[in-house]
Amino acid sequence: MPINKLNFLKIVLNLGALYYIIGALVHFFGITLFPFFDSNLYTPYQDSVIALTAIIFALLLIVVAKNPIKNIDILNLVIICATLASIFSIAIIWKVDFASLGAPAKKLQTIVEGVLGFIWVGLLLWLYPKKTTP
């Protein structure tokens, strides 16, 4: 498989899926793993819902990665959702006092999550297929 923009896009989408699968596992099991999760914030019900959502998003990314041109509408949705998630990750630091919850390191983790998300979205936009016919 030669590395061209389309193949690199597939790799980036699959890496995104891996990121969300790891995030799902650490949320579900309450494992501290930077930047995904701080176990001091573990709440079984909410973290189980987050894990399920992350798995669903990972599966969506895997489907898009198989043929980004054919699945261009879903790729557009992924870009919008990942952008919103990144904005939310950065904005949440003004809403939540992580220190009072016993997880002061989560503030930096949240910022890193948001920045990584923006970098990932930037890669998706740079690799976005210009030709949309299969």
Image (cartoon, rainbow, N blue to C red):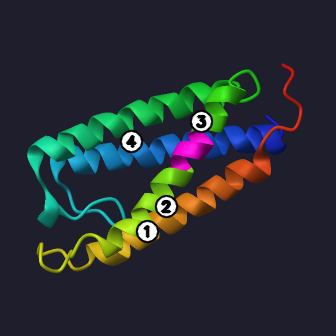
3D distance between C-alphas at marks 3 and 4: 19 Å
Residue drawn at x 18%, y 74% is: 103
The residue wearing badge 3 is 77
Amino acid type shown at disc 3: Leu
Asked if the residue at tag 2 contacts the one at tag 3, i.e. Cβ–Cβ closer than 8 Å, the answer is no
- Horizontal placement of 128 versus 54: left or right? right
**Helix, strand or loop under label 4:** helix
Residues marked 1 and 3 touching at CB (< 8 Å): no
> In front: mark 4 or mark 1?
1
Rounded to the nearest angstrom, the CA distance separating label 1 from label 2 is 5 Å
Q: Magenta region's main secondary structure?
A: helix
Q: Position of residue 6 (x, y in %)?
A: 79, 38
Horizontally, residue 8 falls left or right of residue 12, namely right
**Disc 3 to disc 2, how far (Cα)?**
15 Å
**What quarter of the picture does the C terminus occupy?**
top right
Q: Residue at x 57, y 39 (%)?
A: 78
Residue highlighted by disc 2: 87
Tell me which label, 4 or 2, sits earlier in the chain. 4
Picture quadrant of residue 104: bottom left
Callout 2 secondary element: helix
Q: Is residue 57 visible?
A: yes
